[in-house]
Image (cartoon, helix red, strand yellow):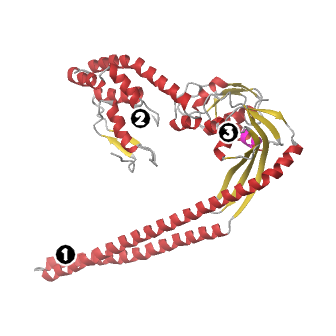
C-alpha cells in the first residue's frame, strides 16, 4: 500500500519483528515523498520488556535513524541465524521480574551485536564503493572520520578556517580542532578551539568554534575579501575517495570556470552564486559539476594568467551573460509563482474567515428567534423574565458578531494591501552582478 501522501507514522503497538516496523515506515517513506517522515512510537514506560525492545530497534537496528538504517537485506541476514521475533516472544512469556528481563535482553543483544555490526559495516562499504558522493550525503551515513561526518557547509567552513588561520594556529584534523597560538583579533583569546558538530560534545577546556563566533566571522569576512587573480589549478579527482561519476565521465577534463554573484532586490534581497564553466572542446558544465570540482583537493599551478585569462574571458562572456540572464529569469518566475500562491492563500483564508463569521451571525439569529418563541410560550412571570434576559444576551452577541464581520473585512483589506505592496516591490525590482573569480581548471 502506497501512503506517500502521508508523512506521519504512529506505532501504537510496536511489533517485535524489525522488518515489520520497516514495512510500516516504508509505506510513507517512499520514492517521491516530498516531506520528512516523522515516526512516533507509543511506549508503556512501566513495562521493562517494551523499553528494551525499543532500545534494540532504535540503537542496534537503527530503524529510526535517518534515511540509512538497517536495510531489509541486513535484517534478513540477521534473522536467518536467529529467529528474532520468537526470541522476543519467549522473553515476554518466561521472564517475570525486571532482573530476568534485563538479563534475557542483554544475552540476546550480545548474540546479535557482532552480526549486526558486521553486516552494517559491509553494507556501508558497498554503498561507499558503488554510489556517488552526493548519495552519501543524502543517506547521512555515519562514517568513521570526523571530517566526513560534517555537512557541506561545515566542511567548507573548516577548509576556509585552515586557510585563513594557518599563520596563527596549529590544526588537529582528527579532532577538527586547532590551537590558536596568536589571535588576529584583540577580543578573541588564544587557546584550544573545536568545531561544533551535531552529536559531539566538545572538550571541557576548548572553546566552541562556529560560524557565528567572532573568530568564525573574521575567517568568513577576510576569506571573501581575498584577491583572486586569474589562476591555473589542478584538482585531484583520482585522489578523491568517493565516486564522482559526473566528473569521471567528462570526455575533456580541462577548461575555464568563472563564478559570479547575482543579487536581486524583489520581495526581499536575494544572493545567488552562478557558475559558468566550459571544457576546452566547448562543452558546458552544469552547476552540479562545478560544485563537485570544488569538493576535490586543488593545487595552484600558476598564479597569473593575465593574457590567456583575458582571452578566455572574451570567449566566456557570452556564455556567462546567457547563464546570468537565465538564472534571473528563473528567479523572477519563482517570485511570480510565490505571489500567485500567496494570493490564492489569501483568498481562501478570506473566504473561510467571512464564512465563519457569517455562520456565527446566522446561528445567533436562529437562537434569538427560538428565544422569542419561548418568550411567547412562557406561562409565568419568572419564565418570561428568563426568556427576555436570554434575548438580551443573544442580541448583544449578535451585535458583536456583526462587528466581527467588519473587523474580518478590515483585516482582509490590510492583508490585501500588503500583497499589493509586495507586487509593487516586484515591479520595482533591480539586480546586479559581481564577478568573483575566474580559473583555468584541470582534473588529474
Label at residue 64: 2
Residue 29 versus residue 429 in the image, above or below:
above
Residue 325, position in %: x, y? 70, 59
- At a point 45% along the width and 75% down the height, the residue shown is 409
- Measured Cα–Cα span from mark 3 to mark 1: 88 Å
The span shown in magenta is: 219-223
Residue 336, position in %: x, y? 58, 65
Residue 93, position in %: x, y? 20, 23
Determine contact: label 2, label 1, CB under 8 Å. Answer: no
Of all residues shown, which one is farthest toward the left?
Answer: 379
Viewer-side label of 3, 1 = 3
Q: Which residue is mark 3?
A: 250
In reply to whether residue 200 is colored magenta, the answer given is no
Left or right of 131, for residue 374: left
Label 2 Cα neighbours within 10 Å, binned few <14 / some 14-19 / many ≥20: some
| Label 2: which secondary element | loop
- Image quadrant containing the C terminus: top right
Is any part of residue 200 visible from this angle? no
Amino acid at each position: 500500500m502506497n501512503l506517500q501522501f502521508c508523512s506521519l507514522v504512529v506505532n501504537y503497538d510496536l511489533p517485535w519483528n524489525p522488518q515489520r516496523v520497516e514495512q510500516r515506515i516504508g509505506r510513507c517513506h517512499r520514492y517521491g515523498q516530498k516531506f520528512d517522515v516523522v515516526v512516533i512510537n507509543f511506549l508503556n514506560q512501566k513495562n521493562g520488556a517494551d523499553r528494551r525492545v525499543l532500545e534494540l530497534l532504535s540503537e542496534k537496528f537503527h530503524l529510526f535513524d535517518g534515511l540509512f538504517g538497517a536495510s531489509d537485506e541486513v535484517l534478513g541476514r540477521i534473522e536467518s541465524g536467529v529467529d528474532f521475533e520468537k526470541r522476543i516472544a519467549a522473553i515476554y512469556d518466561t521472564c517475570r521480574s525486571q532482573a530476568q528481563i534485563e538479563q534475557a535482553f542483554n544475552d540476546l543483544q550480545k548474540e546479535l551485536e557482532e552480526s549486526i555490526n558486521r553486516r552494517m559495516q559491509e553494507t556501508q562499504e558497498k554503498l561507499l564503493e558503488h554510489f556517488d558522493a552526493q548519495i552519501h550525503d543524502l543517506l547521512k551515513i555515519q562514517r568513521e572520520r570526523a571530517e566526513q561526518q560534517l555537512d557541506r557547509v561545515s566542511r567548507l567552513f573548516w577548509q576556509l578556517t585552515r586557510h585563513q588561520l594557518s599563520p596563527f594556529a596549529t590544526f588537529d584534523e582528527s579532532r577538527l580542532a586547532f590551537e590558536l597560538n596568536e589571535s588576529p583579533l584583540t577580543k578573541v583569546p588564544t587557546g584550544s578551539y573545536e568545531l561544533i558538530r551535531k552529536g559531539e560534545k566538545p572538550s571541557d577546556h576548548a572553546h566552541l568554534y562556529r560560524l557565528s563566533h567572532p573568530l568564525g566571522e573574521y575567517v568568513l569576512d577576510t576569506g571573501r575579501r581575498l584577491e583572486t587573480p586569474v589562476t591555473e589549478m589542478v584538482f585531484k579527482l583520482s585522489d578523491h575517495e568517493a565516486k564522482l561519476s559526473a566528473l569521471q565521465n567528462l570526455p575533456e577534463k580541462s577548461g575555464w570556470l568563472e563564478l559570479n554573484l547575482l543579487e536581486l532586490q524583489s520581495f526581499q534581497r536575494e544572493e545567488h552564486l552562478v557558475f559558468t564553466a566550459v571544457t576546452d572542446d566547448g562543452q558546458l558544465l552544469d552547476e552540479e559539476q562545478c560544485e563537485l570540482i570544488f569538493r576535490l583537493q586543488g593545487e595552484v599551478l600558476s598564479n597569473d594568467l593575465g593574457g590567456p585569462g583575458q582571452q578566455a574571458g572574451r570567449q566566456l562572456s557570452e556564455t556567462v551573460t546567457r547563464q546570468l540572464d537565465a538564472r534571473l529569469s528563473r528567479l523572477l518566475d519563482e517570485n511570480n509563482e510565490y505571489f500567485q500562491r500567496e494570493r490564492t492563500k489569501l483568498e481562501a483564508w478570506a473566504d473561510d474567515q467571512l464564512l465563519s463569521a457569517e455562520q456565527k451571525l446566522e446561528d445567533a439569529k436562529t437562537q434569538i428567534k427560538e428565544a422569542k418563541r419561548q418568550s411567547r410560550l412562557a406561562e409565568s412571570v419568572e419564565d418570561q423574565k428568563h426568556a427576555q434576559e436570554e434575548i438580551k444576551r443573544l442580541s448583544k452577541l449578535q451585535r458583536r458578531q456583526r462587528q466581527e464581520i467588519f473587523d474580518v473585512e478590515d483585516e482582509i483589506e490590510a492583508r490585501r494591501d500588503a500583497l499589493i505592496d509586495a507586487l509593487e516591490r516586484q515591479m520595482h525590482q533591480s539586480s546586479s552582478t559581481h564577478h568573483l573569480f575566474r580559473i583555468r581548471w584541470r582534473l588529474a
